[in-house]
Structures are given as C-alpha cells and as structure tokens.
Amino acid sequence: MSNRLQYESSPYLQQHANNPVDWYPWGDEAFERAAREHKPVLVSIGYSACHWCHVMEHESFEDPGVAAFMNEHFVNIKVDREEHPDVDHLYMDALQAMTGSGGWPLNMFVTPDRKPFYGGTYFPPEQRYGRSSWRQLLEALRQAWLEKPEEIRLQSEQMLQHLRQASQVAAATGAEEELSLALVDTIADNLLQQADKEDGGFGPAPKFPATGSIRYLLEYWHYHRERQPERAAAALEQALLSLDKMIAGGIYDQVGGGFARYATDREWLVPHFEKMLYDNALLVILLCDAYRLTGNPVYGEVIRETIAFCYRELGFADTGGFWCALDADSEGEEGKFYTWTIEEWQAITPGIHPAVAQYFGVTEAGNWEGTNILNQAVPATVVMETFSLTPDEWHVLLQQAKEVLYASRSCRERPGTDDKQLLSWNALMNIALVEASLALDDAGYLDDAGKHMAWMLKHFKREDSSLAHVFKDGIARIAGKLDDYAYLVKALCRLATVDGATQWLQEAEELMRYTDRYFLQEDNRFYYFSSSVQSDILVRKTELYDDATPSANAVMMENLWLMGNLYENGGWTARSEAMLYAMKQTVMRYPGSFARWAVFLQQYQVGLMQLVIAGPAAQQALIAWNKAYVPEVAAVAVAEDYASLPAAKGKFKPGFDYYYLCSGMSCLPPVTTQEAVIALLEKRRTGGR
C-alpha cells in the first residue's frame, strides 16, 4: 500500500513510496499533526544514490512490524537532502554537535516545533557494530518522550540556541594588512603537508577529489614558478599526480567515462560507485585548467569522455538539462553494473585482446570482493612492450575493447537514475562546458552552453526574478538556495566572458540584486544559505566551508568582485574584499576546507583585473584572447557603444579595436594588440601589486 510519497516527484521519495511507514514529505502538515497528537517527529534524510540509505530502507523501513511501531508512536518525514539542502544542513549540524560525526541516512528526532533532540545515521535491524538496533532506539526514544518531557524540551532548546549561535559565528576576522606572498606560500605549504605524495589526493581514505585544493596548487605553479621554483614544482607535481591517479583508478569509469563520488581506499581503486553531476562538472573544470597548462592529451581525452557520459546518461541529450546522479547499486548490489567477474570477462574475451586484461588488471581472483574493478593497473608502455604493440596498434585495440565492454555492460540492469534537475548543479555543468570549449578549442561545447543557459533561465527563473531550486516533470519547485544564485551568476559571467553576449551580464546583475535583498546577513557581510522568504527553517545558516561543492559564499565573493567592477558598484567590491579579509586567517590554517576562498585569495594577491575589448572586431579579439590561460583577468567584448555596462561606457570607437586593461575601476591607457596587453600584465607582475 502506497504512502503519501507516491505524490512526490523526487526519485528518492518515490523509492520509499511503497514502504509500510506512513511517510510525510517535508512540510507543515506533518508538524501540525505531531502538535495535535503530541508525538515526536522523525526526520529521515537521504538521497537516491546513497547506498546505506537503501540498506536501512530494506532492513527497517520495509519491515511491517517496525513500520507499525513508527506509525503508532512517531510522525515520520522523509527528506531528499538534494531538494532541501537547508533542512539537511540544519539537522546535520545538530547531529555533528551531538555525536561529533555525520553522514547519511541522517535520522533526526525533533519536537513538533522542529527542534532536534536526538539523532544518528544508519542503525541496523539487530544490535551490532556497537550500535543499538533501530527498533531498540525507537522504543527508548518513545519511553523518554513519555517519561522525560522536560529533559527533552530543555535539550532541544539548548540545541536550537547552539545552532543559532553557530550560524552567526561567521569567521575569525584577521588584521587588515595586505594579502602577502607569504600568506599565499603558507597556504601552498599547508596543502602540500596534507598531500599523499605516493597516491595523490589529500589525507587517508576515504578520498574525495578535492578539486579546489588541486586547482590552488595548479595556479600556484602558474603564478609563482619563477619566484618560488622549488615550491611551485612540488605544487604542480602533487596536482598532476592527484589527477593522474584518479584517472587511472577505479574512481574513473574506464569503459563509459565519468567519475564516481569518491574512493574508499587510498589508491583510488574502489569507488563508492554513485556518479554525481556536480563531481563530474568540477572535475571537468579542473581538467580543463590542467590541460591548458600542460597540454597532456590524456586530460583532453578524459574531458571529452566525461562530458559524453553526462550528455548520454545524465539527460542532456533528452531534456536540454542535466539530471542529478546515477545510483551506486543495481540488482541490490553496490557496483554490480561496473564490475566484472572472471566468468563475465571470459564470456566476451573472444572480442578483446589479452593485452587489455593486463592493462585493466583483470584476474581470476579479482581485486574487490571476488570481482574486478577496471583500472589502469599496468602502464600502457609496459603492456605494449609485453605484447609487442606499437602505440597506434595499442590505441586501436583499447578503443575496440572499450566498445565491446560498453556494449556488453549496457545489457545489464542499469543503476537507478535520479532524474530531477537542480539549478546549482546545472550551473556548475554550464561552466564546465564553457571551460571545455576553451581548453579543447571546440565551439560545439560553447554553443551547447548557450542553449543550456537559455534552458536554465526558462525553467528556473520566475517573474519576480527569484529562482526555483529543482525542476522535474515540467514543474519548477522549492525556493532557490544561495548556491543556486551564486553558481548561476558565476555561470552567466563566465559565459559572457567567453561568448561575448552581454545579455548574460544583465541577467547576472538582476540576480545579484535579488540575492542582496533576500539573502544578505544583517551586518551586510556574508549571505545566509536560505532566503528571508522561507518560513520552514528554524535557523538560517551561513555556509562558509567547501562541502562537496564550493562554498556559495566564496563564489558570491568572486561574483561581487567581478560584477562590482563591471558595473562600477563600489559596495559590491568593498563587500567582496571584506569577506576575503574576514576569512583569510581561517583559509591559511585550513585551506583544504576553504579551498574556493584560497583560490580567489591567490588571484586577488596576484592582481585581479578586467579586460574590456571594444571595437567592431571585438568578438573575434575575445576569441583570440581566451586561447591564453590568464585566470586572473576577466575579459568582456563590446562591438558597439554599450552604455548599460558601465565598465564599457565610452570605450567603443568606430573603426578601431582597443584593449582596456582595468584594475578596480581605473583603466590603463588602451592598447591595440593582445601582445601589448600581455606586456602590460608582465610589467605589472614584476612591479608588484
């Protein structure tokens, strides 16, 4: 018998629609019932690609006896954390305060007025792993609710006060001295100290891609290789080692392209097999930087394969936008779709050269739970030498093998697809397409980015300039969060600086003003994650650290600087600097957790600039300019007198093309060639800020 979740569009909620638990979706109805019946509320949070969420569902939420107890004594709410990230943030903060750790499924018990009093993650059906069983926990909490109401009330009030106080502690403001080269060097040193110099990445297992930290090291080498050759060489080596190890490991799908969420081991062999849109977008952006800096053709190939995966399996070819994720599980087993038993491999080996088995590390024993996770186990040079193959012969054999493997794998039961579309993640993918167009000199990606941007604005933007957070089944729902606004503005600005279409900047300015009105904190420095029009969140949190995606406040800092200079809005640029200075000591100490701030800090220290190209051939000049890798300079092109963009006002001269290099709101005298701009930049760098 179906419950209320049958009417929800979230694939994660739909997965629970036939549970015997009387689930409610997030909303007032459940809390109103809890207040009437004086019952505690279970808020159970997860997402569709979460392996342990599935495990707990099968073990406990599908159990009729457990469900009957939950239905009788609790009001039960199921939340898709991707639809309601602010709800997830609130109760995850509470869980970490209670236990010192977090994760999903997140099971938080709250009062009818939404205040948390007890929480945990996965609970087994029987007592094991040193944990109470789910049924034991429910019984204990039911008894406490009846016998210790005052204790629960006080505990929930204290937790609420803690959460409110924590939301206001934005950062440790440092002294207002200039951002020095010593600070930039210290951040690089701190990242290198955390680095795994054998297997890449940072810290022990589990290992996440850490794209922000790797980007900082790449840019450190780009900016400081002459000033600090030894440190810069170490930064480049670590950045490229991390990328190379991920590409060679099981975290990268060697057959179908695309990256899994993270690796459970140090060597990047065993992934948590879910594939998320945001990870792939961020890794494409990073690989584009690495490709432009090194020219390594492997990076170009992986960029194309990853985008092809997103086009093919995350909905772009079907809808014009991108879906969220592919599940880790199929046929009830994690990774079954992607792994190969020796029997499965041998069934297709007549079409595959034995060199491929050596390359991918396929053995009878397997490398994970009796199966084989394909990875680049043996270097291609060794394989070619062993089997007397030329590079061209090996390339043909490998590509043919990938086609056979992909065709065979396609006949398996596919992992589930979370086919909702989130604005923030789509905006990240839009940036990835723009960066790929530059790195690979492929106008097709830029054309796709323009179409995709038009799709986002059509489906997510409302008449009052607000944004929706999620789109599915033709309906945009749920108020946009700060990352929706921050990432979309970033994508609009990046697209404008590459395709030259200034209407994207007009859209960005409108969204910036909306964000200031409804998200800005009372002290006018940082932004809340949820808007002031929402009424369903007890505490409006200020998110500053990088989670799986970049800090939305850090991205807003970047947006404020660029848009402030392009629109000559001193309030925006001043706020950008205030945010950076407030965070700089924290960033220096914990760069891995605040990597997006660190990247901007380094660019700011080098000297962020704007380039206005004005003239009848400005668009062609912009295309030529963007072939260079100058991440600290944002370029715009105007082929007419464009008065609505203050930075370009009065710079157009009929019959001539001029380059105006600007710092803040003042510009150097115009020059007429790209080479002259590069010379100005070099002169400025050698002369210091």
Image: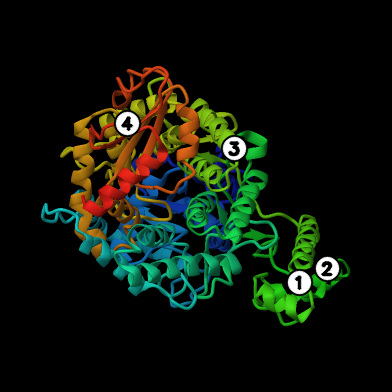
The x and y percentages for residue 542 are: 27, 47
Badge 4: how crowded within 10 Å, few (<14), some, or many (20+)? some
The quadrant of the rendering that contains the N terminus is top right
Q: Are marks 1 and 2 in contact (CB under 8 Å)?
A: yes
**Amino acid type of the residue that numbered disc 1 sits on in the rendered structure:** Val
Q: Which callout, 3 or 2, points at the residue further toward the start of the chain? A: 2
Q: Secondary structure at mark 1?
A: helix
Which residue is the site of mark 1? 356
**Amino acid type of the residue that numbered disc 3 sits on in the rendered structure:** Ala
Asked whether residue 161 appears in the rendered view, the answer is no
Q: Residue at x 58, y 55 (%)?
A: 275
**Amino acid type of the residue that numbered disc 2 sits on in the rendered structure:** Ile
Q: Are marks 1 and 3 in contact (CB under 8 Å)?
A: no
Q: Which callout, 4 or 1, points at the residue further toward the start of the chain? A: 1
Which residue is the site of mark 4? 512
Q: Which callout, 3 or 4, points at the residue further toward the start of the chain? A: 3
Q: Are marks 3 and 2 in contact (CB under 8 Å)?
A: no
Q: Nearer the viewer, mark 3 or mark 4?
A: 3
